[in-house]
């Protein structure tokens, strides 16, 4: 055991002497070489897995971003089906009164809402032919604004204007009736000659009247011939006389 230890010390001493004698004759370390060229870029690696969403604490506020600009309007789509009719809505409020209408004729200073309205329609159903040359009297009125007198058979104008008058008669004998007025130089006569059947006679006229002027209907003897059989006819001889203010 002691001999082995002495041999180890001897080898270590020889090694130390060898190192001490290599200061001038032993080679030095070389310099680092130049870096080589970069290699090719490697292929992209696989996509990583999706991470877990962050957990926001109550102290962090969610801030809404600003609204972006409005996009371009798209094309109109196809027309849809007609829907069901909805419930009827409530009635609207009454509108304001409209302006007064334009006055035609009459007094320019007169309020349009106070313009006179005039109309009548009277009927005679007597079974006797009306006397020749006398004003026809009527039994009843269908419409009468007050200007027509049934007892005298006369219309008296209460408002200046243009009027329209017309009559219809129904009888068996030949009938001649005239529309007469104090504004006419001659009465306007209409006749229907009996041909053995019931006769229908009509006539009409437009007159411009002033307040107080009158219009009436009267028979006249021009072609009217009443036979004995006609005199005995007891059927109603109906005459209808109408008139109204045009403007």
Image: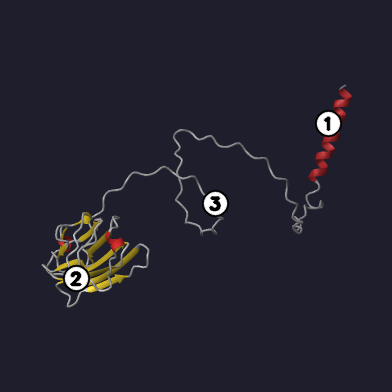
Q: Quadrant of the C terminus?
A: bottom left
Q: Residues within 10 Å of mark 2 (few under 14, many from 20)?
A: many
Seen as rendered, the residue at the extreme bottom is 185
Q: Residues within 10 Å of mark 1 (few under 14, many from 20)?
A: few
Residue at left 34%, top 64%? 199
Rendering coords of residue 95 (x, y %): 26, 53
On the rendered structure, is 231 left or right of 34? left
Helix, strand or loop at label 3? It is loop
Depth check: give the residue in front, 48 or 171. Answer: 171
Q: Please tell me which of labels 3 and 1 falls first in the chain.
A: 1
Rendering coords of residue 146 (x, y %): 15, 57
Q: Residues within 10 Å of mark 3 (few under 14, many from 20)?
A: few
How much space separates mark 3 and mark 1, taking CA atoms?
111 Å
Rendering coords of residue 244 (x, y %): 22, 63
Q: Quadrant of residue 119?
A: bottom left
Residue at numbered disc 2:
180
Residue 9 badge: 1
Q: Is residue 213 above or below residue 61?
A: below
Depth check: give the residue in front, 35 or 131. Answer: 131
How much space separates mark 1 and mark 2, taking CA atoms?
177 Å
Residue 80 badge: 3
How much space separates mark 3 and mark 2, taking CA atoms?
69 Å
Residue at left 15%, top 74%? 183
Q: Can residue 104 be seen from the camera position used here?
A: no
Helix, strand or loop at label 2? It is strand
């Amino acid at each position: 055991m002691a001999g082995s230890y002495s041999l180890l010390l001897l080898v270590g001493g020889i090694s130390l002497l060898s190192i001490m004698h290599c200061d001038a004759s032993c080679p030095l370390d070389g310099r680092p070489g130049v870096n080589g060229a970069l290699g090719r870029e490697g292929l992209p690696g696989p996509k990583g897995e999706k991470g877990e969403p962050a957990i926001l604490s109550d102290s962090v506020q969610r801030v809404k971003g600003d609204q972006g600009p409005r996009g371009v309007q798209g094309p109109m789509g196809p027309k849809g089906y007609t829907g069901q009719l909805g419930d009827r809505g409530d009635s609207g409020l009454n509108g304001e009164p409209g302006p007064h209408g334009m006055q035609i004729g009459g007094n320019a200073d007169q309020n349009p809402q106070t313009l006179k309205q005039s109309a009548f329609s009277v009927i005679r159903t007597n079974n006797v032919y009306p006397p020749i040359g006398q004003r026809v009297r009527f039994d009843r009125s269908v419409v009468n604004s007050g200007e027509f007198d049934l007892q005298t058979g006369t219309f008296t104008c209460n408002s200046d204007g243009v009027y329209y008058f017309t009559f219809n008669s129904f009888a068996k004998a030949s009938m001649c009736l005239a529309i007469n007025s104090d504004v006419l130089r001659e009465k306007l006569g209409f006749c229907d000659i009996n041909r053995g059947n019931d006769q229908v006679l009509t006539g009409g006229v437009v007159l411009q009247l002033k307040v107080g002027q009158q219009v009436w209907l009267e028979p006249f003897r021009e072609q009217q011939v009443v036979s004995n059989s006609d005199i005995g006819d007891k059927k109603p001889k109906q005459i209808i006389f109408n008139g109204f203010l045009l403007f």
